[in-house]
Amino acid sequence: MQIGIVGLPFSGKTTLFRTLANIHLETSALHKKDANIATVKVPDARLDKLTEMFNPKKKVNATIEIVDVIGIQKGSSASTAFSSHFLTKVRTNDAIIHIVRGFDNEETPHPEGSNDLLRDIRTLEEEFILADLAFLEGRFDKLESDMKKPKSREEAEAEIEVMKRWNEILQSETPLRELEFHNDEQKFLKNYQPLTAKPLLIALNLNESDVSASKEICAKISQSIKGTKVRIEPLFAKIEMELSGLPDEDKEMFMSEYGLTESPLNRLLRHAYDLLGLQSFFTVGEDECRAWTVKKGMNAQQAAGTIHTDFFNKFIRAEVVGYKEFLAAGTLVKCKEKGFLKLEGKEYIVKDGDILNIRHG
């Protein structure tokens, strides 16, 4: 799964990408002309605790792919230009993190001359709405042509109805992510990847002095930017950059000076993971403790298939215990004694944090 980082010029998105890659990099970052790409580890305190308890030879975090999408350039008269190449690149991402500037820096002033969180959020959203409307206009032209062909007329009629619905929503300046999509729309979502249908995480890149007020700032923005697939989180890129250069033993003390109990970047990654509709289950043992990524709603057999295709094909049962229950018991043996360890069939819906042992043929 891939998350695109976007933002207006001087918002701090590339600094965020570099910090992410420095702290959580799983494999080498790729630097391309149109995007910087890195596979990063998803921080998980539960996996850290399990690793501490089992002391395995190896710990493996869940991962997501982060893309720093390049293409918004500063234009004349402090405007921004959204190139078609940029929009196409964003369209390939499964979700979007929009970095919004809320920090002061005289050396790199805001292109618009002042910080305005709502203005910048709406600027990007409006551009994405316009891009989706332009795409629909092109589809309508194509579908009109298809209507004249007997073989394609029925399919064209069905698509026109969907495109009309989308067009009506977009014309009202509402992003498509606010729609409850019907089953007949799913294939069009997959094929066309409209920008405004993508889950959106808005990261407010604030001053270090805003830490104590960050919840209030986010709450205020949330009143104007609503939606079930939108999250608003505070970010302090400068603090994160300084944190990334510190040894682990000094990080807690450094964060406490700012009143932080955890890295906002870690929280941002977890929320991005959740926004994609993902969750983790664990496998544990002396050799390895690992977080496996599955879609929410997956059953035990499907989850087993993420480990190995043989586990899916030859699935018999799954031994399952919740993370909290395991922590309370302390060992898998005690989980069995207390009745926490359950034998589940292939239709069992895996929960976030489940510890699984797959029985297979």
Image (cartoon, helix red, strand yellow):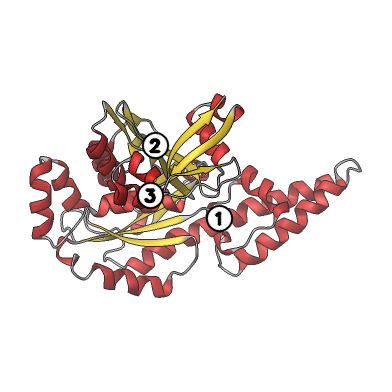
Residue 160 visible within the image: yes
Most foreground residue, 306 or 138: 306
Left/right of residue 336 with respect to residue 195 in the rendered view: left
Query: Are discs 1 and 3 less than 8 Å apart at CB?
Result: no
Question: In the image, what residue occupies the spot 33% across and 31% down?
Answer: 285
* Element type where label 3 sits in the image: helix
Q: Which mark is residue 35?
A: 2
Quarter residue 68 falls in: top left
For the residues marked 2 and 3, what is the alpha-carbon distance in whole angstroms?
Answer: 51 Å
For the residues marked 1 and 3, what is the alpha-carbon distance in whole angstroms?
Answer: 45 Å
For marks 1 and 3, the one nearer the N-term is: 1
Question: In the image, what residue occupies the spot 49% across and 50% down?
Answer: 277
Q: Which residue is mark 1?
A: 197
Q: Which residue is mark 3?
A: 338
Task: Identify the amino acid type marked 3.
Answer: Lys
* Element type where label 1 sits in the image: helix
Question: In the image, what residue occupies the spot 44% across and 47% down?
Answer: 279
Q: Quadrant of the C terminus?
A: top right
Left/right of residue 213 with respect to residue 309 in the rendered view: left
For marks 2 and 3, the one nearer the N-term is: 2
Q: Nearer the viewer, mark 2 or mark 3?
A: 3
Question: In the image, what residue occupies the spot 54% across and 43% down?
Answer: 344
Task: Identify the amino acid type marked 1.
Answer: Ala
Left/right of residue 137 with respect to residue 231 in the rendered view: right
Q: Residues within 10 Å of mark 2 (few under 14, many from 20)?
A: some
Percent of width and height locating residue 126: 49, 62
For marks 2 and 1, the one nearer the N-term is: 2
For the residues marked 2 and 1, what is the alpha-carbon distance in whole angstroms?
Answer: 21 Å
Percent of width and height locating residue 130: 55, 58
Q: Residues within 10 Å of mark 3 (few under 14, many from 20)?
A: few
Q: Nearer the viewer, mark 1 or mark 3?
A: 3
